[in-house]
Amino acid sequence: MHWLPARCRQYTNPVFNIIYIERQVADHARTREICARFPNATRVECDRYGEVFNPKSQNFRLQKRSPSLILAEKHKGRVLQAPDGYGLGGNRNYYFSHMLNCLYDCRYCFLQGMYRSAHYVLFVNYEDFENDMGTLLAQADNEPCWFFSGYDCDSLAMEPVSAFVQHFMPFFSRHPQAHIELRTKSTQIRGLLKMTPIPNAVIAFSFTPEEMYRTLEHKVPTLERRLQAMLQLQQAGWQLGLRFDPLIYQHGYQAQYRRLFQQLFSQLDNEQLHSVSLGTFRLPRSYFRNIVQLYPDEPLFAGAFSTDNGMISYPQAVEQEMTAFCTRELLQHIPESLLFPCTLAA
Amino acid sequence: MINLVVALPAEARPLMARYRLTDKTTLGGFRIYRNAGMSLIISGPGKIAAAAATALLAGCNAAGEQAAWLNIGIAGHATHATGESLLVHRITDHATGKSWYPPQLFDLATTTASLLTVDRPEESYPQEVAYDMEASGYYAVAARFSSTELVQCFKVVSDNREHSSAAITAESCAQLVTQSLDEIDPLLDALSALARDQDRWHAAPAGLEQLARQWHFTVSQQHQLAELARRWKVLVPDQPLWLNAFDNSKKAAEVLQCLQQHLDALAPGPLQAIHEPRV
């Protein structure tokens, strides 16, 4: 089989055989830096990234075997209002994505259903994102603003390529009114460990129990490695978050989640935990249909789901049972003030 | 199934010999040569002919079967040497400016290049790209029938600034393709593997056809049945799609209800199944 060789499957340091570059960013400094990391990659110019990323007849599952990199400029919609119910206590909540698509391959992830292509799109115009954040901060008139990263990608996984944290953290250091959540499953924390921790940043790690991780979270670092990364960050003084989202149901889930919580909270220092959140598994119906078409053989999607208001989820009784159980278990480890259940409207 | 779209008989001959494509038919003026797993159509020159031939071949494919596509032919290039093989990573139609980007999933020795499809033979090669006359027509149509990872374009440089296209003969054309067969083989292997994977993922469980024949399912019910069959294949993988309770079912709706209840009772415990990480 002539797939890209094993070295390319070290997902901490991806290698690209093709880099697509929008003509207008061909001479951008960040483009040049990134291309210099991959001197053997073929560079293919395009007018707009959508020409490569958007065509209908693409198969996300097949492309996930060997995604290419697309370097582009994000022209608009760079920093968007977060949905109601999404937040950590603030009133002004925004999300932004410097990148589309994730290094990892979690089978429950909505990205598989939302995007046709598995190529990574990296928007190199970071400064424009910062300008937009600055505008929102000015409008907020000193009221705290939360900026959530990690919606369309993992915040840290591609750091060696994107230098995302390296660039953006100084901005948040200069704007203490601006809070950032970096949601991740990655152990790429070298950059953070080199920086002085800032109080308005939360590094939020996502977890599922070991049994589910092994079956569903492909290419993700092990639970133990992520925990070790958290401990290193905690020791360095960073605020941490724990994200149990989505909660995945299977027979025996209670013992599995109980074990997970025990493993995490027995080692993490609650005093340095910023927040813990949990959310149930749900997908827009159209995304679910797309994902099932890609993975008709996936056991996760063979279960009984409910449809309500265009969203696929576990039956309500199952959702409620899981949420109640996990909440009870978590409150044995943390005070209620740290817990933020995700209550996204359908 | 592998579908080869080739413009010229001289390009086709080495492929027919290599892959023993001996079964010949003629449809709509196009000659098609086949073996059990591969079809080759000779389109004639030009992108409209290539588009028509591609559409015809797509229509000949068995319903539901995943097909991989490969356009093979000669092309000019400003600087690449004659005889060099190129796997195309961008196809641009000169007349419209539209471009397509065949995803490059394979680690092959073949150089990749951009290709410009022109309406007249190129003689001055102004851009650093390959030049042909068929690829945009072929690709635009093939990509409607298969996912683009399965639609690829392979060219052999036949002319450049040093060697005019006027010197190309049928014999030299056939020779160029023959010399590239060792690079075409692994590409076809890789494409076949992708198509087979897709076939395996989407294969219906045993018994579905019989079930569908035994009761009259409306279109909506057929969709429901397909979805339940998908779940059956995951939850009850080693058994054909049948329940004893169906014997008592007079209507398709009863069959669906019975099947749904059975599957819902099994799930949601499906993650108990141990699976190796998939690609």
Image (spheres, coloured by chain):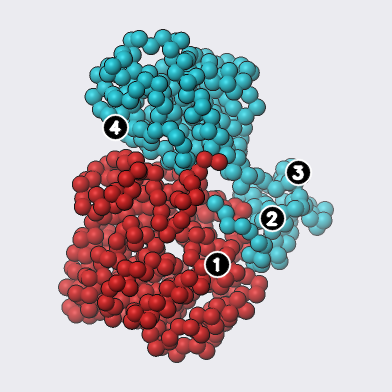
Chain colours: A red, B cyan
Tags 3 and 4 both on a single chain? yes
Dot 4 surroundings within 10 Å: few (below 14), some, or many (20 or more)? few
Q: Name the N-terminal-most of marks 2 and 4.
A: 4
Q: Is residue B131 above or below residue B230?
A: above
Q: Comparing marks 3 and 4, which lies closer to the viewer? A: 4
Q: Nearer the viewer, residue B20 or A33?
A: A33
**Of A260 and A74, the residue lying toward us:** A260
Q: Chain of mark 1?
A: A
Q: Are marks 2 and 3 on the same chain?
A: yes
Q: Chain of mark 4?
A: B
Chain identity of mark 2? B
**Where residue B43 appears, x then y in whole percent?**
47, 19
Q: Quadrant of residue B113?
A: top left
Label 3 vs label 1: CA separation? 38 Å
Q: Nearer the viewer, mark 1 or mark 2?
A: 1
State left or right for residue A133 relative to residue B196.
Answer: left
Amino acid type at image mark 4: Gly
N-terminal label among 2 and 3: 3
- Give the percent coordinates (x, y) of residue B26: 57, 15
Q: Which residue is mark 3?
A: B210
Give the number of the disc on residue B97. Answer: 4
Q: Which residue is mark 2?
A: B232
Quarter of the figure with the N terminus of chain B = top right
The mark lying in front, picked from 3 and 1, is 1
Q: Dot 1 corresponds to which residue?
A: A213
- Judge from the rendering whether residue B89 lies leftward or rightward of residue B161; answer left or right: right
Q: Residues within 10 Å of mark 2 (few under 14, many from 20)?
A: many
Q: Quadrant of residue B234?
A: bottom right
